[in-house]
Image (spheres, coloured by chain):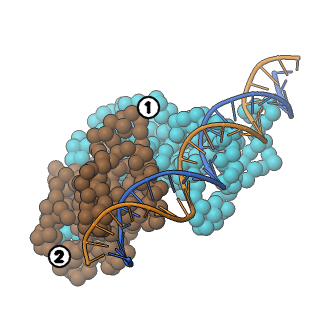
Chain colours: A cyan, B brown, C blue, D orange
DNA sequence: TCAAAAGTGTTAAGCCTACACCCATGA
DNA sequence: TCATGGGTGTAGGCTTAACACTTTTGA
C-alpha cells in the first residue's frame, strides 16, 4: 500500500496469523481437520489450526508450516481465502487472520502428529462449535472450494493417485452438495479427456471391481495452455 | 487464529494496510483511479490509494475511509480480494496489504478531492507502471470482478441510475473483454427480468435515441431469495 | 436524403437431462 | 443363484450462437 503521507512510523502494528481449513475426503464425504484447545480461553473447544506470521515469512509460507506441523505434509494444495480483521475477533489480543484452505490426501497425513495436537477429522455436516469466527471461515472456504472445484481440476488433490470413477463422482457430489447421474457424470469427465484409464481394478467396493483412473496433469496443462477450460 | 501454544506475547507485530482498486465506467471503457506519489521512495510513480489499518477499525472500515478520502463517496460497493504478505513487498517497512476493489459511478466522485491527491483515471489497457506489487493487485481484482459481474448483478454499481441497453452491453463487453451480439445480449437480460424499461429516452448517443432502463433491485432480491441466480 | 445508432426474430447446432438394462463376481 | 455395484447409449428439450434488415431523425 501507499499512504498519501509517508508516516510509517506512527502506525499501529498488529499480530497477523494464518488459519488453515484442511479438507480431506474419506471415500464417502468431505471432512475437515480441527484441533482441540488445551488452554484458555475457550479451552476444550474446537478450532482451526493456525499460527502467527513470522518475520521473513509470507502467509503462504506460514500456512505451509502450520500444515506440515499438523499433518507432516509438504507441497500441499493451498489457496488463500479471506482475511478477517474485526478488532474484537480474538479476545486475547487484536489479531488479523488470513485463512487458507488446504486439500490433502487424507490417507497421507501423519496420524501421530495430528494426535499430538489433539486433532480430529469432522464431517462437514457434524462440525462441533468452533471458537471465535472460525465457523465463518469454514463456511467461506467451503464456498470457495465449491466454485474452484467446478472450474479447475483441483478435486484430484483430495483423492489418491489412483481412484475409481465412483470415488470421483462421490467427491463432487459431496462438495457440490447435489446428486449427479453416473452416466452423465462419466460422459462429462470423459469428454474432457483428462483422465487415464488404467488396466487395474479396485476390488474393494464391489465384486465386479471397478477400473482405476489417474488424472493426467501434463495433458491438462497443455490443453489449458491452448485455451481449454475444465468445467464440471 | 489459534496457536497451539498461547504465546501471543512474543509474536512479531506488523503494519497492516488496505489498498483500493477503484473501478469506474465512462460509457466506453472501464477505468481505474490511481494516485501519483509525491514522496520517496518511487516518487512520481503511480500507485493504488491505500491507508494503514487503525486501532478499532476493520479492513472494510479502512477501505471505506480511504475511498471517501479520495472520492468523497460513501456506501460504495466494496469487495475484499486478496492479502499480500511478501516481507519485501514494501521496501520501507514490512507491510501486509489487504486489497479491496470498489465499484463507483464515475460521475459521482468528487473531482476536487481526487485532484488534491493527484489522482487520475486510467483505461485498463493503458495503466502506467505501478509501484511495488500494485500491478499484480490490479490484475487479481480484475479477475475477481470478471467472475463476480457474470454471476451477480453488481455491474449496475458502475452505471448511472438510468442507463441504456447499449451502455450495459458495452460495460459487460469491456469487463469480460469480449464482443457480444446485441440481440442475444438483450434477450438474455430481458429473460432475467430484472430491468425496468422507462418511457424516457437518452438522446445523446443517437438521433433516434435509446430507451433508458433501471435495475430493479427489490425484484432481484426477491427472486434471489426464491433461488433465482443472475447469470450472464 | 443520407448517415448513424436503435431495435427486433428465427434457425441450427450443441449441450444437458432424464432414464433402464445387462454384466461380472463373491458369497 | 442371487444380491451388489459397475458400466454403458439415446432421445427430447433447452440453451446458445449466428445472422440482417427496418426504423428514426438530425445534420
| Real-space Cα separation, disc 2 to disc 1, in angstroms | 51 Å
Return the chain for callout 2: B
Task: Give the residue at mark 1.
Answer: A127
Asked whether residue A157 appears in the rendered view, the answer is no
Extreme bottom residue here?
Answer: B44
Q: Position of residue A215 (x, y in %)?
A: 67, 53
Q: Nearer the viewer, residue D26 or A21?
A: D26
Give left or right: position of B230 versus A172.
left
Residue that appears at 47% across and 56% down? B184
Q: Is residue A126 left or right of residue D26?
A: right
Q: Which mark is residue A62?
A: none
Residue depicted at 33% across the width and 36% down the height: B222
Residue B53 in percent (x, y) is at 20, 58
Give the percent coordinates (x, y) of residue A69: 47, 49
Residue at x 61% of width, y 67% of height: A226
Q: Position of residue A18 (x, y in %)?
A: 37, 51
- Asked whether residue B63 appears in the rendered view, the answer is yes
Query: Dividing the picture into quarters, in which one does residue B31 lie?
Result: bottom left
In this rendering, the answer to whether A195 lies above or below B108 is above
- The crowd level at tag 2 (other Cα within 10 Å; few <14, some 14-19, many 20+) is some
Please state which of residues A33 and B114 is positioned toward the viewer in this rendering.
Answer: B114
Q: Give the secondary structure at mark 1.
A: loop
- Label 1 environment density (alpha carbons within 10 Å; few <14, some 14–19, many ≥20): some
Q: Is residue A100 left or right of residue A158?
A: left
Q: Chain of mark 1?
A: A
* Residue placed under numbered mark 2 in the picture: B118
Amino acid at each position: 500500500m501507499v499512504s498519501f503521507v509517508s508516516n510509517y512510523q506512527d502506525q499501529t502494528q498488529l499480530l497477523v496469523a494464518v488459519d488453515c481449513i484442511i479438507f480431506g475426503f474419506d471415500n464417502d464425504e468431505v471432512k475437515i481437520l480441527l484441533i482441540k484447545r488445551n488452554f484458555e480461553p475457550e479451552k476444550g473447544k474446537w478450532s482451526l489450526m493456525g499460527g502467527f506470521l513470522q518475520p521473513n515469512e509470507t502467509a503462504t509460507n506460514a500456512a505451509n508450516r502450520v500444515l506440515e506441523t499438523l499433518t507432516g505434509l509438504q507441497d500441499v494444495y493451498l489457496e488463500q481465502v479471506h482475511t478477517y480483521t474485526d478488532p474484537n475477533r480474538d479476545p486475547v489480543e487484536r489479531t488479523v487472520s488470513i485463512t487458507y484452505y488446504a486439500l490433502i490426501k487424507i490417507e497421507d497425513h501423519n496420524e501421530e502428529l495430528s494426535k499430538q495436537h489433539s486433532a480430529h477429522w469432522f464431517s462437514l455436516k457434524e462440525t462441533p462449535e468452533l471458537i471465535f469466527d472460525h465457523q465463518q471461515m469454514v463456511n467461506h472456504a467451503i464456498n470457495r472450494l465449491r466454485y474452484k472445484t467446478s472450474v479447475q481440476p483441483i478435486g484430484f488433490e483430495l483423492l489418491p493417485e489412483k481412484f475409481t470413477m465412483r470415488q470421483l463422482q462421490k467427491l463432487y457430489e459431496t462438495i457440490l452438495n447435489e446428486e449427479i447421474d453416473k452416466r452423465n457424470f462419466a460422459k462429462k469427465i470423459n469428454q474432457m479427456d483428462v483422465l487415464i484409464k488404467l488396466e487395474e481394478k479396485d476390488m474393494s467396493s464391489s465384486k465386479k471391481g471397478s477400473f482405476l483412473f489417474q488424472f493426467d496433469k501434463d495433458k491438462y496443462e497443455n490443453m489449458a495452455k491452448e485455451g481449454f477450460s475444465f468445467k464440471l
